[in-house]
Structure formats: C-alpha cells, structure tokens
Image (cartoon, rainbow, N blue to C red):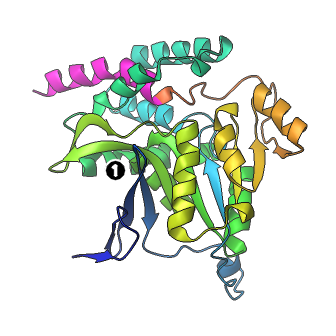
C-alpha cells in the first residue's frame, strides 16, 4: 500500500514501506526524479558500536557517478552485463568504446548534439518492464560495478554519512541504475535521467532532459529547496568540467579524478582535488561518461532488437 506524504505543490511523494521512494517535481520545464530508500543504512559508526550522530538536516553531499564514484561509466558496465546475457554483442560494445574514445580525444562532448542524444538515450529499453531492468541492474552491479567503486570516493561519502549528513548520487545514467548503486553503497538516494513508464513498461522516451550539465545543478537546487538544505553547507564532487554548474551550486566543490579542464578550474578556484587513479591519468578505465547514455543507445539498440527477434 502506498501513502502520499505532504510536500510543496508540484512535488508529490510516494512512499512504499520497504521500497524506494520516488519524488518527482518540476523546475521550469525540467522534471527530476529523486530515488531514496525508505530504510536507514548501516554506516561506520554503527559497525563500531557507537551511537549514531545527530542528523545534520541542513548539510548534504552530492556525488557524480561516472569516473567519480566508479571507474568508468555505469551505463557502460550495464551494457557489458547485457552483453554477457546476450542482449548485445561484443561488436556493439567495441563500437561504443571507440566512439567514446574519439569523443574524449576530440572533446566533442562539449559541442555534441544533445537533442539527438536525448532522442536516442533510452530507446534500447523500449517495451522492457521496469522490474526486469531493476533486477538486471542489481545483478550487474554486483558482478561488474561493485569491484570498480573507488575506495577513496566511497570513504568520502561515508564521512558525510558518519557526520549525520545525507548523500545523493547525481548521474546522467537512468535513475533506476543510480538507485541500485545508492542502495548497495548505503547512500541516501539518487538523482538521474528519468524514462517514461506506461503500465509498468518503458516507452523509450525521456521525461524532461538528460541529467547532464546545468540540469544537474537545477536538480540539486530543487532538491535542496524540498529537503530544507542549506546549499552553502553542502559539498559536490565530480571528475568532469561538465559538472561545473553543480559544483558551483554547492558551497564546496571537490574535484575527484578530474579531467584536465576541471583540474585547471579547481586550481584556479582553490578547490580541493582528490585523485584515486593509478598509472597514466589520461587513461580512463571505461572511456564513456557524460553523453554515454545516448551514444550507448545507438550501439545497443540493434543488439537488443536482434535478441528480441531470436527470442520470438
């Protein structure tokens, strides 16, 4: 049974006991879904047998996912998991990886056609059941994503939890993937790209825009207003200069495994820099990042179609 809780106009909350909470709201023409877990999570203080800290309701932390919390892109690892289950082919993944490598080397993600990316972003899940995608995301996280969580970044997030603060992931990946990652890591919840759902199945269209660039900052500002956060006391973490709007929105920005542009900006502004990578810093574990959702869709849609034809 679901109960509707009070909230500001246009921002209904639905709570299912023991299930994720999805909060939807509008800011101008944008819509954002925030997924949280109705249960509290065990953190360092609990494991140590110490009393929990007093909740700090005015402060929070916001973490980008790809190359910040995790080595590589979550949507890429999700596609790898689909390939292992014969939903896409190795060739699809190789083409995707090559596109992403060119994307980074040529820096085209700053001037790419986001409207085309948005159009293709979640086409590959058209007709899939939401519960099937969530089940796959859980399996694939345990198999492929969990070993690639940066220990150092995870420790930063735990520090906020231990201080009684809430921690959200903010990612261009589908919110269902972000929710699984947040749940597995014991975080508060996730903000992500929202797919349209009708009768429990995806239509292949987006609700609003990709959670990318300025959209992340708008989502964080909206969430702060709803949750009563003081953004001047909040911290944002990212690896990419594309997330400068989100880093600016928080009172404290931290560059984690930064790209060259963000590193220059962090040095100019005196921001803290944390780098947990080893070896050649120019090499990313799984090249895709910001527009990965859209480019991946182009690579996997044909593979999913082939899978469906074989299944039928």
The quadrant holding residue 44 is bottom right
Q: Nearer the viewer, residue 232 or 56?
A: 232
The relative height of residue 298 versus residue 61 in the rendered view (above or below) is above
| Left or right for 132, reference 245 | left
The main secondary structure of the magenta stretch is helix
The relative height of residue 57 versus residue 72 in the rendered view (above or below) is below
Residues rendered magenta in the picture:
293-312
| Left or right for 15, reference 250 | left
Does the segment drawn in magenta span residue 307? Answer: yes
**Residue 125, position in %: x, y?**
28, 34
Q: Nearer the viewer, residue 12 or 73?
A: 12
Residue at figure coordinates x 57%, y 62% from the top left:
224
The quadrant holding residue 92 is top left
**Residue 43, position in %: x, y?**
64, 73
**Residue 268, position in %: x, y?**
89, 36
Residue at figure coordinates x 76%, y 22% from the top left:
282
Does the segment drawn in magenta span residue 123? Answer: no
The relative height of residue 154 versus residue 144 in the rendered view (above or below) is below
Q: Nearer the viewer, residue 94 or 26?
A: 26
The answer to whether residue 285 is seen in the rendering is yes
| Left or right for 200, reference 78 | left
**Residue 216, position in %: x, y?**
55, 44
Q: Which residue is mark 1?
A: 134
Quarter of the figure that contains the C terminus: top left
Residue at figure coordinates x 87%, y 41% from the top left:
269
Q: Residues within 10 Å of mark 1 (few under 14, many from 20)?
A: some
């Amino acid at each position: 049974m679901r109960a509707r809780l009070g909230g500001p106009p246009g921002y209904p909350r639905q709570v299912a006991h023991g299930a994720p909470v999805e909060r939807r709201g509008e800011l101008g023409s944008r819509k954002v879904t925030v997924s949280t877990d109705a249960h509290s999570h065990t953190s360092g203080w609990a494991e140590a047998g110490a009393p929990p800290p007093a909740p700090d309701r005015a402060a929070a932390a916001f973490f980008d996912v790809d190359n910040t919390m995790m080595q590589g892109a979550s949507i890429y690892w999700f596609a790898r998991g689909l390939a292992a289950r014969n939903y896409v082919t190795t060739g699809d993944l190789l083409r995707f990886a090559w596109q992403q490598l060119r994307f980074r080397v040529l820096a085209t993600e700053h001037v790419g056609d986001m409207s085309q990316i948005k159009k293709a972003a979640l086409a590959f899940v058209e007709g899939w059941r939401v519960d099937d995608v969530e089940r796959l995301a859980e399996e694939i996280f345990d198999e492929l994503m969990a070993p690639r969580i940066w220990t150092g970044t995870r420790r930063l997030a735990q520090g906020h939890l231990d201080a009684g603060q809430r921690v959200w992931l903010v990612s261009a990946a589908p919110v269902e993937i972000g929710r699984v990652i947040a749940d597995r890591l014991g975080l508060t919840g996730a903000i992500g790209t929202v797919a349209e759902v009708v009768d429990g199945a995806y239509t292949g269209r987006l609700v609003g825009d990709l959670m990318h660039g300025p959209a992340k900052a708008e989502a964080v500002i909206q969430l702060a207003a709803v949750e009563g956060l003081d953004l001047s006391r909040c911290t944002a973490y990212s690896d990419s200069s594309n997330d400068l709007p989100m880093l600016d929105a928080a009172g404290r920005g931290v560059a984690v495994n930064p790209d060259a542009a963000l590193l220059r900006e962090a040095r100019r502004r005196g921001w803290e820099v944390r780098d947990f990578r080893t070896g050649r810093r120019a090499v990313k574990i799984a090249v895709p990042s910001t527009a990965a959702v859209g480019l991946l869709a182009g690579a996997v849609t044909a593979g999913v179609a082939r899978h469906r034809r074989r299944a039928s």
